[in-house]
Image (cartoon, rainbow, N blue to C red):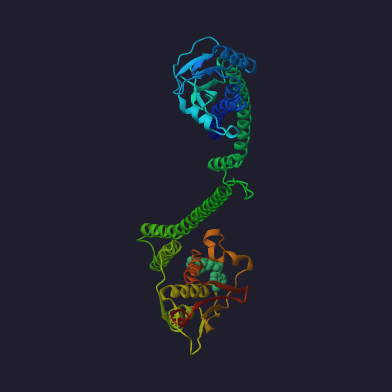
Amino acid sequence: MNRLFLKLGGIILALLLVVGTAYVVVTSYISEDYIAEVNQQLYGGIAEHTVSEVKPLVNGQVDTSQIQEIMHSMMVINPSVEVYLLEPNGDIITYVAPYKRVQLERVDLRPVKAFIAADPADRPLIKGDDPRHPEKSNIFSAAEIRNSTGKLEGYAYIILSGEEQASVTGPLASSYMLKLGKNLFFLSLLVAFLMSLLAIRYLTRNLRRIETAVQRFQEGDYEARIDTDNRGEFAVVSNTFNAMASRINANINEMKSLDQLRRELIANISHDLRTPLAIIQGFVETLIMKNDTMPPPDRERHLTTIFNSSERLSSLISQLFEYSKLEAKQIEPQKEAFSVGELVQDIAQKFSVLAKDKNIAIEVERPADLPRIFADLGLVERVLQNLMDNALKFTPVGGKVTISMAADRHNVKISVVDTGPGIPEADLPFLFDRYRKGARTSSGKNVGAGLGLAIVKKILELHDQSIEIKSRVKEGTSFIFELPQQSAKTA
Ligand SMILES: Nc1ncnc2c1ncn2[C@@H]1O[C@H](COP(=O)(O)OP(=O)(O)OP(=O)(O)O)[C@@H](O)[C@H]1O
Ligand SMILES: [Mg+2]
């Protein structure tokens, strides 16, 4: 930030220097011309005046006494003038000037003629040859000299800013202008520079705020935001950064919670896997050790336990596999139209053996004109299996499980109702992710992995549906969900 500040300051300083120098140069140039023009305007009529007053040439011959006269009157008005008499072709006939150091023999007549031709009231600045300083031009006054017949006999050519004056006004004016210019220049430079430093500071204030927030964020403070009033120069940048920071923060939190979930899942599952495995190991060990001495009924009991445990292990693993596939969204529902009534009938048939063992009645309520539904057959079967599995598992002997179906405008509503022990209200919120909470109820020794309902929920989510539970302790539990009718999806 400081580097940006310095860079901007440097650029502005350089700009000011360039502009200031140009200003000084132009000013002094213009002021020189200005002084010259003023002089020429003031004294431009001198030659004309002189010629009308005196007759410097008599029949082309220099009248020295007249010249002295001219010289005298000139000196009174302006001691620094230099008077020249020119032939009609520009040759210098004679001159009156201090320090006779004239170097030119002829004067360029073009500016002289231009001067004479111009309207005195509106005459531009015209410079002509300065016989003493051939290298530079100077302001002058000029007039034609004509004899009584009107014939051009020559010119009076008067250098206005003579050597003396030039030697005084030149340095004086330029030093004055320069001093003024310089002082002005440095003063305005300083002021401008200070002002621009303030301006930069003001403008970069928001930038500094952004930098601070970005730095804090980079150092790990994910709550760091740029406080912006939506009006500053960098409002868009600030808002974008804030939105980005919030997004990153949300993603990090989501990743953290997913990570946490996975950790809990693994911990709970490995615990659940260990139990049947330990049982199997223990019983197999006993069998190996007492192979010869164990009476056949005991041996059979052991083998049955081993078989049950291994079945449990295998169902646990397959459920886990199924659930993780669902969670990773690896399962894409293959939707088709089918009769859910027939599916329910089939499932009721399959569970009837188990139900008979526990003396539980299974009832199917199915209206005759039930429309077909549009869903993944295999996944819906899993939902019904899991719900039936729970219902039969938790309902005590002599109870009843009812599967009923009903159609409304777009959907078919399916409910699985049992007369079991019910679920305490406090447990309801965690029912679908018990594996996560690790909150195992001790309702019987045949406690499952707790994945059944989680799988049900995931499958229904894949169908954009949810599941509802109604439960009363000691009265029973109902699981209710809907699936879309075929017409709604295909028509
Ligand atoms: N019909 C029901 N009646 C009473 N409690 C139920 C019923 N269905 C589910 N529950 C309760 O909800 C819990 C979660 O059910 P879920 O099907 O997810 O797991 P689980 O049956 O214990 O194990 P899994 O299905 O993985 O073998 C059950 O352990 C039980 O406490
Ligand atoms: Mg279950």
The answer to whether residue 14 of the structure is visible from this angle is: no
The answer to which of 382 and 373 lies nearer the viewer is 373
Above or below 474: residue 255: above
Q: Residue furthest front?
A: 149
- Image check: 328 left or right of 3? left
Q: Residue furthest bottom?
A: 368
x and y, in percent, of residue 25 in the image: 54, 27
- Image check: 314 left or right of 446? left
Figure quadrant of the N terminus: top right
The answer to which of 24 and 20 lies nearer the viewer is 24
Figure quadrant of the C terminus: bottom left
x and y, in percent, of residue 453 in the image: 51, 68
Above or below 72: residue 316: below
x and y, in percent, of residue 356 in the image: 48, 81
Quadrant housing residue 308: bottom left
x and y, in percent, of residue 238 in the image: 57, 48
The answer to which of 219 and 483 lies nearer the viewer is 219
Q: Residue furthest top?
A: 99
Residue sitting at 60 percent across and 67 percent down?
428
The answer to whether residue 196 of the structure is visible from this angle is: yes
How many marks the image carries: the answer is 0
Above or below 453: residue 226: above
